Image (spheres, grey):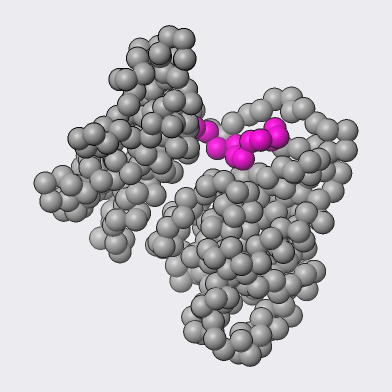
Amino acid sequence: MDDYQSADQMQAMPKVFGNIEQPADAQIGKFVVFGAANAGKSTLVNRLTGEDVSIVSPRPQTTRTRILAAATEGSRQMVFLDTPGVVSRQGLRRVERNVVTSPWLTLGEADLIIILLDAYKLTQKTEEVEKYIFRNLGHRTDVPAVLVINKIDLVEDHEALAAKIADYKQAYSNIIEGPIYISALGNVNVDELKVFLQSKVRPGNWEVPAGVSSDMSTLMRVEELIRAQWFARLTGYLPYVVRQKNVVWKYAEVPKEQGMLQDGPGHAAEPRAAEQDADCNSGMQKVLYIEQQLIVPSEGVAKILLGTGGQKIKDIGRDARLSIARALGHPVRLHLQVTVEKDTTHRK
């Protein structure tokens, strides 16, 4: 194997780009996407950038740290900071401290806050977190904001929704635009929002090179793609108790036919991705070998994660590998091992 990389946490650090080539009229805008869990923040960021930078899951708190995504068009660069869902005071004990503090701390980085509200929740009178946000927002920041109402396609009582929104607009005096009604999932009115955001860029240096969609390290992106798969399959509290540990991370140049991974008889995985990295003259291509431990706190959780006959972990590994190969543009071999480490910090 060549290009061996040790599986240490330094590889999970954001990318550092050094001197970035800037156009003479470089412009930039930094936008924090802020709201409750499941408001659709990650889906919106992916729509605005045209890249699957943030993982999307129906589970709350899928995003656990601030993620930077960027879209560059001409001389204008828009930087989006996707944050974990805001947690109300009642929910503080259920999540890690960094998940609680990250959204609020990120506000200071913004030129403009995108306050994203779930239209359906507002009409169902289940907006405990939204009320908490607006009670505290004015005390935490004075950054201007645009109010964006997502999932508008799920709402029938538009009159009741409008009344709720009017109350929230009064609660934060720095809202300069909105409401803009969108469906991030259905890609409805997202272009309208994008045009507004483009109008708010200012002269300034870009933060990432043109053509780069995120400062996320390759290791972190891989781990996010793996995590998305177990979040899609586990229910209740179970997705949140699984931890990842990277054990093997190494690249190798192998003959092209060896890089073609099989999902079943006659079904080669990701042939186009494999061909992108192949050396046409030598017939060699780059393959990334990954081994990760998925650490759980009990044998019971391990059995659920493994599934009957180990089928669930096989499905997680297969779909994660395909996602990683698409994201990186070359073949991947992935091995996942479920390990039990009992939590000794629990207090009765």
Location of residue 229 in the rendering, given as x and y in whole percent from the top left corner = 35, 49
Residue 79 visible in the shown view: yes
Horizontal side of residue 75 vs 68, given as left or right? right
Name the image quarter holding the C terminus. bottom left
- Where does the image place residue 158, in percent across and percent down from the top left? 61, 86
Asked if the stretch drawn in magenta spans residue 67, the answer is no
Q: Nearer the viewer, residue 251 or 191?
A: 191
Is residue 270 shown left or right of residue 114? left
Q: Residue at x 52, y 47 (%)?
A: 52
Q: Is residue 239 left or right of residue 18?
A: left
Left or right relative to 79: residue 151: left
Confirm whether the magenta stretch covers residue 218.
Answer: yes
Q: Quadrant of residue 62?
A: bottom left
Quadrant in which the N terminus appears: top left
Give the quarter of the image for residue 152: bottom right
The answer to whether residue 130 is seen in the rendering is: no
In this view, 65 is above or below 61: above
Q: Residue at x 80, y 37 (%)?
A: 205
Residue at 35 percent across and 14 percent down: it is 255
Look at 53% across and 63% down and name the residue there: 185
Instruction: Please state the extent of the stretch shown in magenta in the rendering.
Output: 208-220
Outermost residue on the left side: it is 309
> For this rendering, which residue is in front, 187 or 82?
187
Q: Position of residue 166 (x, y in %)?
A: 70, 83
- The secondary structure that dominates the magenta segment is loop
Q: How many marks?
A: 0
Quadrant housing residue 15: top right
From the viewer's perspective, is residue 286 above or below residue 328? above
| Nearer to the camera, 315 or 204 | 315
